[in-house]
Amino acid sequence: MAATNNVQQTTVRGTVVDASGEPMIGVTVSVKGSSSGTVTGLDGSFSLNCKPTDVLVFSYVGYVNQELRANANLSRIVLKEDNAILDEVVVIGYGTTTRKSAVGAVDQVRSDLLENRPVANVTQALQGAAPNVIIQRKNYNPNAQNNNFNIRGISTLNDNSPLFVIDGLVTDYDNFNRLNPNDIENISILKDAGTAAIYGSRSANGVVLVTTKKGKNNERTSIRLNGMVGWEDPHILFTPVTGYQNAVLRNIAETNVGNTPVYSQDQILDYYAHQSEESWALNEIFQTAMQQNYNISISGGSDKTTYMVSAGYFDQGSNYVSTQKFGLQRYNFRTNLVTELGRLKLTATLAYTRTDSKNTNGGSLEIDASRVPSAYIYKMKSADGRYLLNDVWGEFNPLGQLESGGFDKYRTNAITASVTGELKIIDGLKLRGVFGADVVGNNRYSRSMPSYYYAGEDATEPRPRKESDFRTSNWNADNYRLNTQILLDYNKTFGVHTVSGLFGATNESYTWYNNEIWKNYVDPDLGTSTSITTGEVGNIGGATTVDSSGQTSITSLLGRIGYNYKERYYAEFDFRYDGSSKFHKDYRWGFFPSLSLGWRISEEPFMEKYREKVGDLKIRGSYGILGSQAVGDYDRYTRYSVSSTTYAYNNQAVAGAGFNLGLKDLTWERTNTFNIGFDASFLHNALNITFDYYTKRTKDILMKPLQPSVFGTTMPSTNIGEMSNDGWELSINYRLKTGDMKHNFYFNIGDSKNKVTKFPGNEQISGVDEIYKIIRVGQPLNSYYAWQVEGLFQSYDEIKNSALPLGAEVAPGDLKFKDQNGDGVIDSNDRVIVGNAFPRYTFGFTYRFEWKGFDFSMFWQGVGKRSQMLRGELLEPYHSNYSYVMYKHQLDFWTPTNTNAKYPRLAAQGSASDTNNWGRPSDIFVLDAKYARLKNLAIGYSLPKKVIEPLGLQKLRVYVTGQDLLTLTKNSFIDPESSEFGSNMNSGGGNSGRNYPMLQYYGFGFDVEF
């Protein structure tokens, strides 16, 4: 080191090398607390003007930062590699491991990806966060919190949902979704047999492990307060044509098939003259709504005790226009306490969640509002506040229903408590006992209230909504889940050998009680029977009380044996032996084992010369058998029930005792799972890559066999089906630091493809609205099955020389179907598989940038391949019972001057052309639903410590954020995420697009630590 004769400044010189003595190029050398700095050159050397008392910071991606005084010896500074990623603790079933020692397929999502996001639940925050974790948001209504949650695709014809575990206790999806995202430390997603087999008979679809936050030893008390306020704006993706355009086009549809025009010239001119007075009912029933989220936590600890206490409040208003304050509120409270008493470690957890939800009662308001033209004559409300009827709605008014038609109130109180005792017996050997309970109480109070409508603005006498039964109902459901565990855990290193073992027994029981009481025609104010006569409201109903209850339990033995040599070679054997009350005692028990192997090639001596480029390289593989118990609680029994419509005789329903056959020898579904993958890091751990390939073969799938139509009841489920599911996944993370700037790029992508391999009768075809779906051996489950559209007929000569459906009468501009077998007729033999609804090539991309307190992040999520079946008025102009509206995206229809159109010619409902184009199963109903969505965008600023520390603060960050801001997709008139799936990811009916509109969020927030 040399110095100038300047008293205030000195020029310091030195060299930076790595642990092997090699010079390091591009190391940032900066003066702490200032903007001064430089970087090392080709030989690792640097020079910098600074004060002798300044602190120099040496930083390089993948290495631990080092701080030295400027007057220290700087001739040779050695930077050490940052192995934090390799040493990261990864939560697995009933224990933990490290990233470098993990030999199974496990993804871990950290808390920073879940916090400060404008999401209503944890599931929404996980979308796109890990490869092959497939989440579809089914509905944007704040009162509809159920999303499709899938890991690695479809492996069974039954439920494909994963198992959820919170702080070591098995729970259900609802409890998982009630968690406060700010209370979560991390989420581990177990994907293969090597990680999931220890959960045995419920692990075939993957396992989601949640670890909540706890205090840290010897940490001062820290108070963290954060909040977020924003507004969700309904983003309606389709728009009707103007009133006069609608009338003109409707007339064209009629005259194209020889009918008389519906609208006169005077009516059309009248609509044209009043365009400025037009409004659309769908816009009138939605509004911007506020979302608020506030959280506080207090944590800390001594050398023996740690604590964390938190509370949260979430409020998402409904976007419905109403005075009834629809929406969702959630209150969370949690405390985690850990203390050590000599060899005994005690952990106590208590969590309470209350959710209050209020929604509209009665009907699909979006349907009724969207099917009304925008012509000025269709008003929802008069100037003096009366609800109006029209020829489209009949005896209904969506706004009247929202504001005075009743409500559904839901309230849930959920308590989770657990106590864990861990005793250190000898060095490396621990005995752990756990007792936990979930207690959940649900209540729904529903009122259908009379809404009074007027036949027109001139009408003076109102009339109540005729289809309403003015029902009042009260439903209660109480659920109890008890969990007991006793576990013996061993881990010991003997020189270069490390041995671990886990053995234990668990018992879980689940009990539920439901009851409901309801009564029709209840006075809206007094709760007594109304004085409304039968003629005014229809048939008078009665009152009914319904009660039900049930109980299940599962007892298990489990274990894990692990070995590694020099942290280079790894082997692990996991098993679980489950016994379930759902099965007969002769078939109750099932054994689910797995074997995992790993090889850290980077620890081999021959890899030393590549150490500069390759930080870690590991190959791992696993094979095992996972299970699923996709049966009802009492399916092994024949069950009887009394009904007023048990069977038919002489065209009359006859009361009696019906039954459902049981089956004694029901047993588990079993999935043989193979996984092989690698983990690699390069550029001093700045670049990390993980890849996995897997195969799943499911046998003994529970399904109903074929039966005669006159059998009299349904056959019981039997273990007779088989499926395969193959896929892969890739994640890439790259960290870059240049001076004060930090960049972090994370990308993940995954794919899965399922195939039915055994099915009774080899195939099953079922109608789904305007199309068919098929289960066929050798094909993906529930594929869409229909005719292929070859184009549009352009002339009668072309029609004459083409194959047609039997009895079809078509004209130029109508759909032309492909004659697959060339027999000259379009019939059922020409149907082919035209798509599948399951998302493929799901991906997520996150970019984060930090510079001098500023931060910027964006998160993209999407699907690379998916077929979306759309039916109804969003596709077909003037559709069926909603044949009043045409939308702007439908304007590209065939005419003699627009022969290369997207859609067939306009044709009146019920005409031969309409039947050909929209009444036959074809792939015109199947849309390309791949998309990329800007899921989240955030810009923030953290005030410097020198500014906030005098105020007693450790952190103060403010930010603005947006959610679902941009979607890139082929069909902009429907949300591509809108799902045809049921809750278990099996395809249901067609998607009409009649959903609560997509919401775009804009807001701001703060994060403060004391």
Image (tube, rainbow, N blue to C red):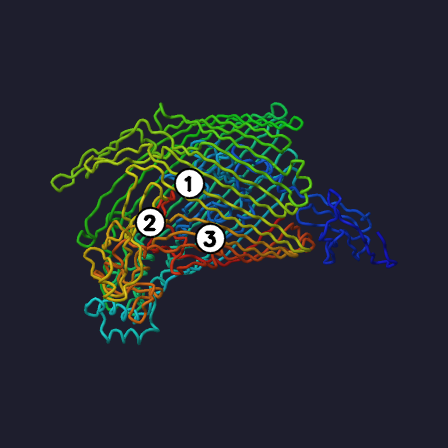
| Image spot of residue 59 (x, y percent) | 70, 50
In the picture as drawn, the residue positioned furthest to the right comes out as 5
Residue of label 1: 725
Quarter-of-image position of residue 41: bottom right
Q: Is residue 439 visible?
A: yes
Q: Can residue 313 be seen in this view?
A: no
Residue of label 2: 833
Residue of label 3: 862
Disc on the earlier residue, 2 or 1: 1
- Dot 1 crowding, Cα within 10 Å, few <14, some 14–19, many 20+: many
Rendered residue at 42%/44% (across/down):
753
Rendered residue at 27%/29% (across/down):
638
Q: Is mark 3 on a helix, strand or loop?
A: strand
Horizontal relation, residue 856 to residue 412: left or right: right
Q: Is mark 2 on a helix, strand or loop?
A: strand
| Image spot of residue 511 (x, y percent) | 38, 32
Q: Which amino acid does label 3 sit on?
A: Gly
Horizontal relation, residue 771 to residue 114: left or right: left
How many discs mark residues in the rendered view?
3
- Dot 2 crowding, Cα within 10 Å, few <14, some 14–19, many 20+: some
Mark 2 to mark 3: distance in Å? 24 Å
Q: What element carries label 1?
A: strand
In the picture as drawn, the residue positioned furthest to the left comes out as 650
